[in-house]
Image: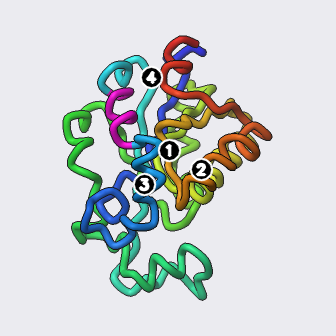
Amino acid sequence: MDLSKTALLLIGFQNDYFSTDGVLHAVIEESSRVSGVLENTLRLLENAGSRFGCVISTPIHFTESYEELENPVGILKTVKEAGAFRAGTPGAKTIAELSPYAGLITEVAGKRGLDAFSNTELEVLLRKNGIEHIVLAGTVTSICIDSTGRHAAELGFNVSVLSDCTSSRTVFEQEFYCEQVFPLYGQVVDIQQLLAA
């Protein structure tokens, strides 16, 4: 894998998920602890962040009234009911742990749902930078990571999901997606395998 033609895509690294007082922290807490998603992602950024063609964050933000969500169901209904990811609130902000890498990370705004390509300029940025391979890190594995990975594969990008830099709602769900779902359209690797490749 040529890291200069690879984008590290960071999904969901926001306070409402990763801060202990985040309104959706409990949803991913156990899986995040087991996979070590935050610690491992920070280690990857520290050791290899500058070697990627680009590092991109795609935070999700909603207006105060959640007017973007008409008749939401599933996780988006939960997001609205919990009052998560409202633009301008502490919970919607990128976690402080990523601050040391702010100069390395390009933020792509506009994400309003599960897929980081929907309603954003993500594909344009990737094409502009000559990216051929997408590496996914963040949360939630079964929702935003999977939706974005599938879309990337449909667009012709090679897709890798970092098993130790992602987390889901449960440990079982994380393992199931890494073992049974992601290999259907991409590859699953950990940090050590990524750097070795």
| Up-down relation of residue 161 to residue 116 (above or below) | above
Q: Say whether disc 2 or disc 4 marks the residue closer to the N-terminus.
A: 4
Q: Give the labeled residue for mark 4.
A: 52
Residue 36 in which image quadrant: top left
Q: Out of 76 and 118, give the one closest to the viewer.
A: 76
Say which quadrant the N terminus sits in.
top right
Q: Which one is closest to the eye, mark 1 or mark 4? A: 1
Label 2 neighbourhood size at 10 Å, few (<14), some (14-19), many (20+)?
many
The type of residue carrying mark 4 is Phe
Give the numbered dot on residue 12: 3
Q: Out of 96 and 179, give the one closest to the viewer.
A: 179
Magenta span of residues: 38-45
Left or right of 12: which side holds 177?
right
Q: Say whether disc 1 or disc 3 marks the residue closer to the N-terminus.
A: 3
Label 3 neighbourhood size at 10 Å, few (<14), some (14-19), many (20+)?
many
Report, in whole angstroms, how far the alpha carbon at label 2 lies from the one at label 4: 25 Å
Colouring: rainbow
Q: Which one is closest to the eye, mark 1 or mark 2? A: 2
The type of residue carrying mark 2 is Gln
